[in-house]
Amino acid sequence: MRKEDTIGVSGPWYPLDRLLRGRVSMYAVVEPFLEVCLLRRGPQDLPPSGLLLGLALVAYYLVSALTAMAVYGPGVGLLQAGVEVITLAGYTYAGLQVAGRLARFWQTLIALAGTGTVIGLVMVPLVYVLYPEASGNLAAVASMVYLLLVGWLLAVFGHIFRHALSFGHLGWGVLVALGYLVVSSVVLQGLFPMPQQGG
């Protein structure tokens, strides 16, 4: 990656540099990720900024930790979230390396972590409804909404991978995203088996 690809904190429409100078609201920084979540923009619209990458990964880690702590408790939850971030970065790097698109790594990972944070924030309260030993109508509704959000996450990640890997159809990107969910599940369940509820 060329030096100029990694310097700077603003793309043509991304306002991070103005936020640092106190000229825009936090929503203006989050809005681009909402646009990606709605499939209106892609990873190519985000700047390859090291600062933005760090912020996106920290946010993704914190949301993942909140989710994991509902199931595993604080200690294991914090560790699991770290493994999840590493898995996301490693899978993305490997996919782009194989496709010969490694120059797009930063923007792709920023997009994945940022959109994962946005959707993850919506998922967090649902996880706390479902664990531990949720039952009744509220749990049924929470489960349904959670599955819909997983489907949305799959579509958004597929959209990102489609652009990052230059696929002609969204379906191919969704397959790559599905591959990530499978790899992530295998890694996390292998290292952190789901605790028995009520045990």
Image (cartoon, rainbow, N blue to C red):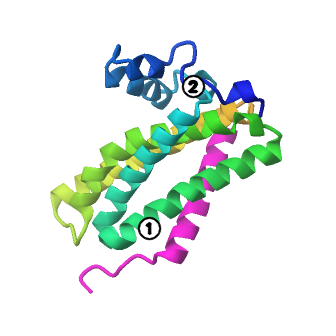
- Please state which of residues 193 and 86 is positioned toward the viewer in this rendering: 86
Q: Which mark is drawn over residue 98?
A: none
- Can the viewer see residue 111? no
Left or right: residue 55 versus residue 190 is left
- Percent across and percent down for residue 22 are 33, 18
- Please state which of residues 93 and 58 is positioned toward the viewer in this rendering: 58
- Percent across and percent down for residue 32 are 46, 23
Left or right: residue 65 versus residue 129 is right
Question: Principal SS element in the magenta part?
Answer: helix
Alpha-carbon span between mark 2 and mark 1: 29 Å
Left or right: residue 46 versus residue 78 is right
- Please state which of residues 190 and 168 is positioned toward the viewer in this rendering: 190
- Percent across and percent down for residue 60 are 44, 47
Q: Earlier in the sequence, mark 2 or mark 1?
A: 2
- Can the viewer see residue 198? yes
- Determine whether 116 is above or below 163 in the image: below
User: For mark 2, what is the residue?
Assistant: 46
**From which residue to which does the magenta span run?**
171-199
- Percent across and percent down for residue 33 are 46, 29
* Circle 1: residue type: Leu
In the rendered view of the protein, which quadrant contains the C terminus? bottom left
- Kindly identify the residue that appears in the image at 61 percent across and 54 percent down: 180
- Kindly identify the residue that appears in the image at 24 percent across and 82 percent down: 198
- Please state which of residues 36 and 17 is positioned toward the viewer in this rendering: 17
Q: Which mark is drawn over residue 79?
A: 1
